[in-house]
Image: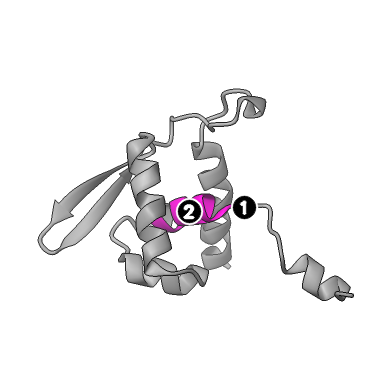
Amino acid sequence: MTSSDDRRATWTFLTHHARVLVQLARNPEARQRDIAANLGITERAVHAIINDLDQAGYLTRERDGRRNRYRLHLDQHFRHPREGGLPIGLLVAIFTDRDRHNHAD
């Protein structure tokens, strides 16, 4: 039998895709290695997620020397039909606005 703490740790409200998107909104020049370390997932997973987001039109990669810079397309809508065509910018704003408020204190 698992404890309630174990069960709580097995799921979250945000997917890794959403978390990567928020990380890129916070720092468009973030390295995939740093995103992976911050989220506790592999670099390979981050790379696959960024490819998914790029192919779906949620971001564009721009080469800047040896690094990538990511431009997010926050007017793109959530993929699931139940989200009613809401733009992903609403989700990103929740977390980036929170960051601004925490830094202002």
The verdict on residue 95 being magenta is no
| Magenta-tinted stretch | 14-24
Please state if 86 lies on the left or on the right of 3 as rendered.
left
Viewer-nearest of labels 2 and 1?
A: 1
| Mark 1 secondary-structure assignment | loop
Tag 2 and tag 1, C-beta contact below 8 Å: yes
Residue 1: x percent and y percent?
A: 89, 75
| Mark 2 secondary-structure assignment | helix
Residue 4: x percent and y percent?
A: 87, 71
What's the residue type where badge 2 is placed?
A: Val
Residue for point 58% across, 68% down:
105
The chief SS type of the magenta part is: helix
Instruction: Name the one closer to the observer, 43 or 64.
Output: 43
Residue at which label 2 appears: 22
Residue for point 50% across, 68% down:
39
Residue for point 52% across, 50% down:
18
